[in-house]
Amino acid sequence: MSIVVQNLRRTFGTFQALRGINLEIADHQLVALLGPSGSGKTTLLRIIGGLDFPDSGQGSVVINEEDVTDRPAAERKAGFVFQHYALFNHLSVFENVAFGLEVRPQKIRPGKDAIRDRVLELLRLVQLQGLEQRLPSELSGGQRQRVALARALAIDPKVLLLDEPFGALDAKVRKDLRRWLRAFHREIGVTTIFVTHDQQEALELADVVVVMNQGQIEQIGSPQQVYDHPATPFVYEFLGDVNKVRKPGRPDLFYVRPHEVRILFAGDAAAELHATIEHLFAAGPSARLTLRLQESRETLDADITRQQLEEMGLSEGDEVGIHLALSRS
Amino acid sequence: MSVQTRSTQDPLWTRVLLIGCAVGFLAVFLFVPLALVFAEAFRKGIKVYADAVTEANTLSAIYLTLTVALVSVPLNAVFGVGASWAIAKFSFKGKSLLLSLIDLPFAVSPVVSGLVWVLLFGARGLFGPWLREHDLQIIFAAPGMILATVFVTFPFVARELIPLMQAQGNDQEYAALSLGASGWQTFRRVTLPNIKWALFYGIILCNARAMGEFGAVSVVSGHIRGETNTLPLHVEVLYNEYNSAAAFACASILSVLGLLTLALKTFIEWRVGLRRQKH
Amino acid sequence: MQAKRPRSILPGFGLSLGFTLAYLGLVVLFPLLMVFVKASGLGWRGIFEALWTSRVWAACRLSFGLSIIAGLLNGVFGLLIAWVLTRYTFPGRRFLEASVDLPFAMPTAVAGIALTTLYAPNGWIGSLLKPYDIKVAFAPPGILIALVFIGLPFVVRTLQPVLEDFETAQEEASATLGATRWQTFRRVVFPQLVPALITGTTLAFARAVGEYGSVVFIAGNMPGKTEILPLLIITKLEQYDYEGATALAAMMLVVSFVLLLVINFLQRKTLVRNVA
């Protein structure tokens, strides 16, 4: 189901959380809203879900060709998974998942057996069979996350919205769940938007990454696009490591990723710049050099292969030449 | 603000209705009786009021009330500090039982709180004969009223200090000791400044109850005008004599005390956020 | 109470704990113990005879019955007031918030004479009710009003922190799942308030059973009709019926202790739930 957001603005007091957001999301996509805290990504998600509203008259939200801007959350059928899951503490796992079906008006409420079947099916889908009678307090973080997901899916949502889905989990669980979620999305095919501040997560998981900063969208594109062809300096800096360098005699700033810095012998004719190795750290197949440029006294990080490091016999204090394999300036 | 209803917000009509109910309930149960106290006190004019307040028996009741509070509040304040030091700074067996026992006087009817002292020191009490031999009077005299007041106000200071000191932990005290401070210096210069507002808060509540206590004091008081009547008991005597204006005049003094307590309490809460405030 | 050797370098453990126990013992425990010592002197038979009279039975029914009703009323209105104070912003909210403690701060005797004068047949409210033949002061409804007055802060103050800490995301989750506001309150919020609500109601009930000052003026104090338990103790004392007073006091203490245990249990349960 498609989502179209047009010219959305949201102000909290004097703080402009969203300053004119335009966004189109096609069916079945898995979309990441990526940005630092305070960039407005969660506000945008909440407005799409009907938990918050744009400033009056400022923008519209259309889900599946239906304008839902003024619709309250209860009427939107958007499955929302909260950052800390917001499971109902007093209800069992089963009752949590069944909640959305049981609060339906009598006319469209499924029968008891139908609800039961649906809940058990969902719990199977999120691999929580056998935990129906547990209370949320008796579950691990990853299990709670999946209960929240099953609960959101129970209402057959038109769109699934996840707020920092892995934020409250430890690193190991996070990685497992990430892999699982991608496979899961492929299986259910519901258009899904998730909010994250973790670039790794966004790049690995999403079909489309929406990079946000200070209430605006900086770039929309596939993970490959936004990483390799950042549209703005912000995107360049936010996604992956980056060096800011000035070439001698030119005023403009260059953005160079560490792996794009080519290390040459000091006397190499191709060297554009010259530097001293201040620090050297080698672990695994690559090595990280911290260089001090002789021309501008700026520092620069460079990643080279372990093989190159050994072939060139580099050590701290050595002088080297540099060529910047620039993808973009 | 947007026109839409947030999913955590009640509809306007609900809000108006519930606020109306709450205000109405509080008005009937709290504000009207309070207003009545002052209205009745001044109904016969300022002169009658002034006479009632400055009458000799009233003054002696005020004097006794202050005496009782002046003895019992410091006692319980010292106890509160000592108890919270032991409970919050150390771990020992039976701590939760001790905590429950400290709260015990709150659960006891004021009348029983007075009665226990009669059973101990009354004419037919445990120490009654001994007291008579030595010509000492505790019950139906000021000492008994102080004891009864100490009993009912016992937990006030301790229960404000204990949770606060538990939450603050021992790190600052450890730091002070490691810097060479003595135990007493640590308490006076590190602990005490950290708990002073809570201590003050507890003392205010303790004092309000000490000055306003009626049931417990009533049991042990001799009800002798000008001698063993505290202000609340004096109010009762006047009221039962159908001297309504004088009774309410004295009641108005106690009401001002209550309002002052509330104001100070609110001020401290606002000042230090002792009780968590919203937003 | 056996003190384990504290594993703390802080000084003053022995002194502060010793003082605490000594003071607690002298001021609270020993006097309370006296009640039971005296009562046991009466023997079971004596206690039974002192308590098994129609006058005591009537006072028990009145005190416990009205205290239960007052507790329930406070439960309803306390929840309403706590909800309004934590959830809504409106002019005068802070003033209302502070005034909830008025029954704590106001001496009970003052409340007693004020409520009596207010609801007496010629009082501000009493005179309004008189044409309808509703008698409040010097009748059970008057006692009920006094008990509601002194119990109100307990429920409000117990519920407020729970409501303040309530995770609003749960309400939002409920809304996104299609629940109406009422369904959200009834199925999500209210069940999680129940432990605190019971605690507050029990506190209000416990206070009401023992309350004396604010009730004694408005009660009418007719033996067998409007005589509450604490007053009966005083009456017996004034008649030098120490045995009767002691037996009654012992019974009330037992009730207090049981209620205290219940409240402690409930509070621990509330705490555990909040932590989970």
Image: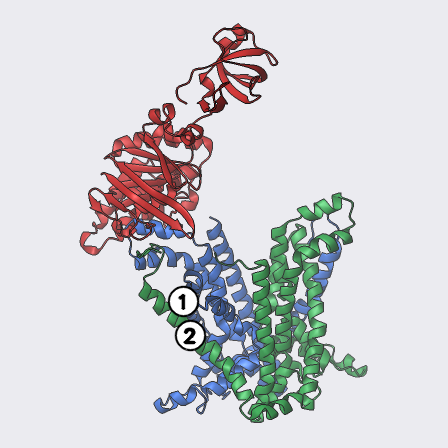
Chain colours: A red, B green, C blue
Residue A56, image x, y percentages = 31, 53
Q: Which mark is residue B197?
A: none
Q: Quadrant of the C terminus of chain A?
A: top left
Residue C98, image x, y percentages = 52, 68
A328 shown above or below C63: above
Q: Chain of mark 1?
A: C
- Apparent side of residue B38 relative to residue A174 in the rendered image (left or right): right
Q: Chain of mark 2?
A: B
Residue A195, image x, y percentages = 37, 38
Q: Residue at x 27, y 52 (%)?
A: A70
Judged from the image, the secondary structure of the residue bearing numbered disc 2 is helix
Type of the residue with mark 2? Phe
Q: Which mark is residue C80?
A: 1
Where is mark 2, residue-wise? B25
| Furthest-left residue in this view | A107
Type of the residue with mark 1? Leu
- Apparent side of residue B184 relative to residue B204 in the rendered image (left or right): right
B113 shown above or below C86: below
